[in-house]
Image (cartoon, rainbow, N blue to C red):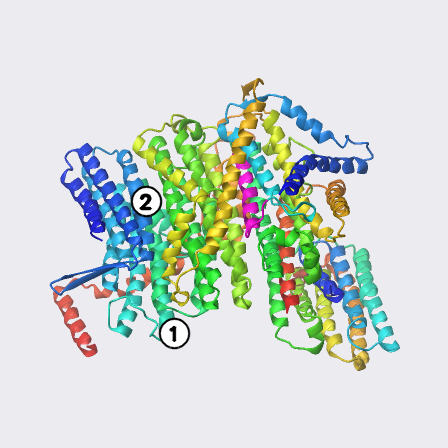
Amino acid sequence: MNYIDTLLSLVLLSILFSFGSSRLPVLIRVIGFQGVVVSGLPLFIGNDHSLGGMAFSLITILIRGLVIPLCIYLIIRRVAIRREVAPIFGHHASMLAWLGLIAAAAFIGNKFTLPVATQNVLLMPTAIALVSGGLFLLMGHRNAIAMVLGYIMMENGIYLVGTTFSSRTHHIVEFGILLDVLAGVMIMAIILQNIKQTFDDVDTDLLQTLKE
Amino acid sequence: MLVFWVGLLLILLGGVLALLLNRNFMWLKLTAVVLTAAGSLTGLGATLSLLNKAAPATISITYLHLLSLSFKIDGLAAFFLICIFGVALPAVIYSFHYMHRAENPLAVALHYLFFSLLIISMALLVSAADSITFMLFWELMSLSSFFLVIHKHESADNRRAGYLYLAFSQVGAMFLLAAFGLIYGHTGTFGLGNLSGLSQSVRLLIFILAVIGFGSKAGVFPLHVWLPQAHPAAPSPVSAVMSGVMIKTGIYGILRMYALLNLNSPVPGGIMLIAGIITGVLGGVYALGQQDLKRLLAYSSMENIGIILIGLGLGMLGVSAGKPIMAAFGFVGGLLHVLNHAAFKSLLFMAAGMVQHSTGTLSMDALGGLLKKMRLTGIAFLMGSLAIAGLPPFNGFISEFLVYFSGFHGTGLPRHGFVLCLLAIVSLAIISGLALAVFTKALGVAFQGEPRSAAARSATEKGWTMLLPMSALAGLCLFIGLMPKAFIQLAVQAAAGLNPAYGGLPLEPFMELIGQISRFSMLFLMLLILLLALRSQLYQGKTVTKAGTWGCGFTRPNTRMQYTGSSFSASILAFFRPLTKLTEDHPVIRGRFPGATHYLSKVNDLAEMYLRPVIVNPVLALFDKLRWIQHGDVHLYIGYILLTIVVLLFFV
Amino acid sequence: MLPSMLFFLSAILLAPFFAALILKVKAFFAGKKGPPLLIQYYTLIKLFQKGSVYSTSTTFIFKLGPVLSFCCALSALMFLPVAGRPALFAFRGDVILVLYLLALGRFFTIAAAMDTASPFQGMGAAREAYFPIICEAAMFLILILLYVLTSNLQIKAFFQGGQPLLLWHKAGSPLMFVVIALFIILLTENARVPVDDPATHLELTMIHEVMVLDHSGPDLAFIELGSFCKLFFYAGLVARLVWPFETGVPALDLLLFFLALLAVYVAVGVMESVMARYRMDKVPKFVLTSFALAFFAVIVTLELAK
């Protein structure tokens, strides 16, 4: 049994949870779990076991798995948004979308022939599923926080591809992106608080009233 | 071959004599039934004896060099002939007591005439050896069945159903003409010989045209719209024949075309599979939504056509992928299901006819408790339900099992093949689950529980000619389920002509597998009998009392509080929501003392829903625009004729 | 043949014991002592000794139903390789036959419920017809996966002897999902929490229990014993996957199998203790999860097979 593939299949499964759940804390936990796996993976694949590389991975795990989810969790607490966020698509439709997504990701993932992907066949499909799953979450939610979570899931996917493609020389770039995401989450927190003060809710449909 | 013709002649004689004897109602019926039954029996015997011959029987008739008809009975044709005669025989016997409108003997006589024409045309079209013969009898079949559908033409609904059916069969025939025209254009002959010389794209085009044309007869989604209208309109013996065998002539056509074209590509298999999956699942879902027993059966025919198409599609896929076992199991499973469906669907239609005969209604929510009043009909319906739900030890299971087996073999195919096989297996599972729901609903609501109306309360069953065919068919369903070997051999013989690449089909894998299953089925029955004996032993000397059903504390239950058919199916239909648009009529209840209210729900068929806005309205609009052509002046019409001739001369 | 017969008989005899185990686990969670472990035997004996009351609405189907569904469950057990030993029957395609036999049992349970003319039983019957549609689809997906792995379509090839271990070697991670999916199917098909609650009888929300409301005496005993056997069948399959190892010592293997079986039953009991029954409209979602998991396992296996 290949442990990396097992981990990756768990990540794929976590997308299902994020589709099926209408509770924000569950979504946050899913994102956190994906963050940990995605950023921890370079420790196992690739040949770069230098001290810098290890330290980089550990910091990423910390930020993706702990800091970002915690931040969002705190935002929820602060803004006291409803925990239940009903997705636009029904449960059965989401489930069907997930199945289609997994199948499509597996199909597209096979089109790439990458040296890393030959050992871990699930790598590319997982990355693609994460990106498109994030997009689906963005599409399927009105709640701003759920949308941010969708965005982070997408970012997880991109990171998964990025880390495996790039050799370890591009730490700086990766790290820069990570900091961007972190900053984005912080800014979002502030904006959300403002939105909340204006509208008493973070339903993006309400933002349409700002059109004029 | 001569015996075969004698049989057909007897059937024709039955129809014609009925017309001549229309003064005396009893004699009319007796002559028609006896002669048609004797003819069917003769035909059945002739076909069976032809099967044992090595070479297919052929004959051609030429009349003054103008019209030449040629016939050939090979394994495939013989298989369908057996189905046709096998259903016609019980159906015509059944009709003796069913046709009771003595006040209008002419209508009944005409019914028998068209009935015999329908059987003859079906028998001759499956044995046709050239396209002219085929189309001739195809049209005769469509027309005679049209007249049978409008047998009770007093009702506007029936007339509308008849016209819809006629329109669909003519549009289908148009596609067939196009397909045969293409063949003639490329080969220059009407004969249906091997067409493998044609280019691949032409052959594919011919196949697709044929699938559309034959599919409209077989009831493939979305060309099935006529089916749920025509079946309830027709008298029950006619519905039994139409649903049991007539729609299968579409399947025969597709198979014959496939054998001729010798397409070595996965496309036909793919088309058949996708059509089968959609037809099967939607048929099951819509069948569940029906409240009218015959409409339910009509939709369930669609579901079974889906299973047949899946089987044949798997077979074709197996041929193109070079997997003999998969191909053999797919074709044989599909063909055996043709036979099985002919048996249990005609049985179920006969039972429904008996219900209509004695209660005057087919609406399930007005029935109930019939099993106590109509014991034999109820048991026959129960056995038919078990068979059609594909449950062992009945015949439906055997054919579904073979199709499953073919599908599992297909999962070894690369990409698209795998996906198709996966879909086929999963949808077969869903279809059989739906079939179980559909027939527990039909049985539970119409035959079990307490009667919901006065008509259902006073129901009785009488007329031994109606009960006998039902019992025989129910017995046949169980018999095929327990000893399927001979029938599988028939199907193998029929399928042997389909994939010439492999020569003869292997018989051993079937026999070994089926032998195991039938042995176990026997054992299962023995175990059941043993347990029943144990049960009666356990009840020896015990007090067994009768009381009302426990109403969970509610003391004044009435029969209208029973679970209705619509509530039974509501949650499953909700699961398939985008496919099942529900129209509800339910006024809001207001005030402290609300008045009488009602609830009406109808599950809309997607194809029916979009038929009007997408096809009917545009066509009507187009013809509305062309109305100026119809001027009313004779001279102008002659001018049109002249113009047409001139234009045509340019092309010739 | 003889050992298989013995295993088959012991499975029938042990099924009520294991079913009682669930009650014990539930009692433990509730802080009670619980009924004795032999409670189901006592119940069966008591029921077999009683007479029956039949509703005036019922027909012969009502009497045939319990015996037939019991017969179907027994037939299914004949194909179960208990503890990885050869089953009484095994031939190509036997899985399909078993699934359809269970469906036959279901048909008669539904028909017997519709026979009583009770709206409550009708409600239960409608649900009994509904959920297994999804379950069967999931089951066939699992079968496709197992067929892809073994190129064989019989229970023997999946669950007998060293086969389960081989499956784990070939496709470890997907098989994990298969186990979960199979467990969900077990809960659904056997009317356990969170799909159905076997503890309460008279509610509108029940499925299986409400369908057998009108049965009494030996008929009810047949139903109960049949449902124990059915549960044993599914639990036996799951247990073989959970504990695929073979030590080579027959007695030890047997012991370990029953321990694994015990674990499955305890898992069912724990599920029932810590979860509430789902609202009816949530149940399809739960069942659909097993379909999704099975589908997912198929896709992943195909990826791994490359």
Q: Is residue C255 left or right of residue C5?
A: right
Residue C108 inside the magenta-drawn segment: yes
Q: Residue furthest front?
A: C2
Instruction: Please give the count of numbered marks on the rendered protein.
Output: 2
Identify the residue shown where x is 41% and y is 36%.
B380
Q: Quadrant of residue B213?
A: bottom left
For the residue pair B104 and B623, the one nearer the viewer reads as B104
Residue B437 visible in the picture:
no
| Mark 1: amino acid | Gln
Q: Is residue B62 left or right of residue B300?
A: left
Residue B589 inside the magenta-drawn segment: no
Q: Position of residue C176 (x, y in %)?
A: 70, 56
For the residue pair B597 and A113, the one nearer the viewer reads as A113
Q: Quadrant of residue B366?
A: top left
Residue at the spot of label 1 = B200
Q: Position of residue B333 (x, y in %)?
A: 44, 54
The reply to whether label 2 and label 1 mark residues of one chain is: yes
Q: Is residue B396 left or right of residue B70?
A: right
Crowding near pointer 1: few (<14 within 10 Å), some, many (20+)? some
Q: Tell me the chain of label 1.
A: B
Q: Tell me the chain of label 2.
A: B
Mark 2 → mark 1, Cα distance in angstroms: 38 Å
Residue at the spot of label 2 = B87
Figure check: C247 above or below B392: below
Disc sitting over residue B587 in the figure: none
| Mark 2: amino acid | Val
Q: Quadrant of residue C229?
A: top right
Q: Which residues are magenta?
A: C89-113
